[in-house]
Amino acid sequence: MLAPFAVLTTVFALELFVGLGSSSAAADKRSGASAVIVVPAHDEGLVIGETLRSLKAALGERMRLLVVADNCTDSTAEIGREAGVEVLERRNLDQRGKGFALAFAADHLRSDPPDVFAVMDADCCIDKASLQALVASASAGRPSQTINLLRPDRSAPPLVQLSTFAFLIKNLVRQRGLQRMAGRVHLTGTGMAMPFSLFDASSHVRSSVVEDLALGLELSDAGHPPVLVTNAFVWSGGSTERGTLTQRRRWEGALSRRRCAGVHAKCCMASEAETFAAYCPGST
């Protein structure tokens, strides 16, 4: 009974050990690819204005923003339009969640698709160099993930600070370890991009609460493993203590119900340690 836990602990420790070393700086690449940065938003009126101002300043040539105001009851859509950004409004109370919002954006773009489909959450920010590096990486043909971190806040409650540190371990150290051990990483939901054709072909995983993990695993299975863009960062603010607990329970519950059996089956069938590591999302 203890053997699987021992193996998981060993793999986790290896990921940390391998991921602790710093990455060499990637070359500053410029891409002529067209890109749409999709911002799914549900009642984000308090924060989306600042997010859009930051994103507009980061846009390069042939990049544009698209906000999906998903089942909103506040001023999210109006704020987006006032910022000069294209806004889609989606209303479907039977199909809630980020995955459905992204699918709605893909349907809208299909008649004139961009080269790159990128995703930024409505409470995140990214600098120009990071966005440029992300789009350049995705335009080369592989799903790409920035280093997704929470802004440290020394005045936050201990639980929130612990969550911020766990984010650092999960999205920086473990991701670097996975990249070096398995040649692939997990998609974390924001600051990610891929060729539009790859996202458009992955519609059946988008309704999951953990659709980012599911999408990354599906793309890896199809021969398109996500890559970490080590010189690109996306930042978001930490949640409240209550929000941290709520989000963690929601995510873990969804993972157990929807993906756990499939992921564990893949782990058990994997014959190589690096494949095993890539399929096990861990507990942070």
Image (cartoon, rainbow, N blue to C red):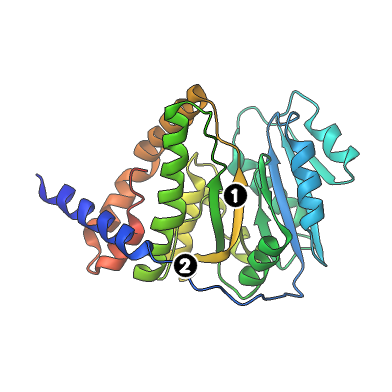
- Taking the spot 61% from the left edge, 42% from the top edge, the residue there is 236
- The amino acid at mark 2 is Pro
In the image, which is nearer the foreground, mark 1 or mark 2?
1
Residue 89 can be seen in this image: no
Work out which residue is located at the far front of the displayed protein and give it. Answer: 154
Q: Which of 156 and 186 is in front in this view?
A: 156
Task: Look at the numbered disc 2 and give the secondary structure of its residue.
Answer: loop
> Can you say which quadrant of the picture contains the N terminus?
top left
The number of discs equals 2
Q: Mark 1 points at which residue?
A: 190
Which percent across, then down, holds residue 171?
Answer: 46, 52
Question: Residue visible at 57% across and 74% down?
Answer: 26
Provide residue 185's location: percent of width, then percent of height: 44, 61
59 relative position to 147: left or right = right
Whichever of labels 1 and 2 marks the residue nearer the N terminus, that label is 1
- Note whether 57 is above or below 83 in the view shown: below
Instruction: Tell me the element at label 1.
Output: loop
- Residue 23 point in image, percent of width and height: 47, 69
Residue 165 location, quadrant: top left
> Which numbered marker is on residue 114?
none
User: Which residue is painted at 83% across and 39% down in the image?
Assistant: 80
* Residue found 34% across the figure and 69% down from its top: 181
Q: In this view, does 45 lie above or below 261?
A: above
Res 257 → quadrant:
top left
What is the x, y in percent for residue 86?
84, 47
Residue holding disc 2? 225
Instruction: Look at label 1 and name its amino acid.
Output: Thr
Q: In this view, does 45 lie to the left or right of 84?
A: left
Q: Is residue 124 visible?
A: yes
